Image (spheres, rainbow, N blue to C red):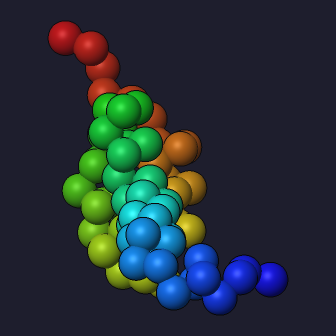
Amino acid sequence: MIPAAVADSWFFWLAIIDGLAAVYILPTVIGIARRVECLSLVICLNAILVGWPAALILACMMPRKPIR
């Protein structure tokens, strides 16, 4: 249980919102870091809340772009 003083703090809610935002954009960040072939598909699926699990799977499993 969270104490009432912590739950009333603006810093607590800001940290919660920042953490949720970081988790939400995680598939896009993984796709960029891995340099996946079809990053636009990962971004489009990530924009849809229901498509977030698919975007995470694609970001982790799509083939990488060849290094030129």
- x, y percent for residue 6: 59, 77
In this orientation, which residue lies closer to the viewer: 8 or 16? 8
In this orientation, which residue lies closer to the viewer: 52 or 63? 52
Task: List the single residue furthest toward the left.
Answer: 68
Task: List the single residue furthest toward the right.
Answer: 1
Q: Quadrant of the N terminus?
A: bottom right
- Residue sitting at 46 percent across and 65 percent down? 15
- 55 w.r.t. 17: above or below: above
- Residue sitting at 36 percent across and 46 percent down? 29
Task: List the single residue furthest toward the top.
Answer: 68
Left/right of residue 60 with respect to residue 37 in the rendered view = right
In this orientation, which residue lies closer to the viewer: 40 or 49? 49
- x, y percent for residue 12: 50, 72
Numbered circles on residues, count: 0
Q: Tell me, yes or no, if residue 63 can be seen here.
A: yes
- 30 w.r.t. 43: above or below: above
- x, y percent for residue 27: 44, 54
- x, y percent for residue 60: 53, 44
- Residue sitting at 71 percent across and 82 percent down? 3
Q: Tell me, yes or no, if residue 45 can be seen here.
A: no
Q: Quadrant of the C terminus?
A: top left
- 6 w.r.t. 63: above or below: below
- Residue sitting at 40 percent across and 78 percent down? 10
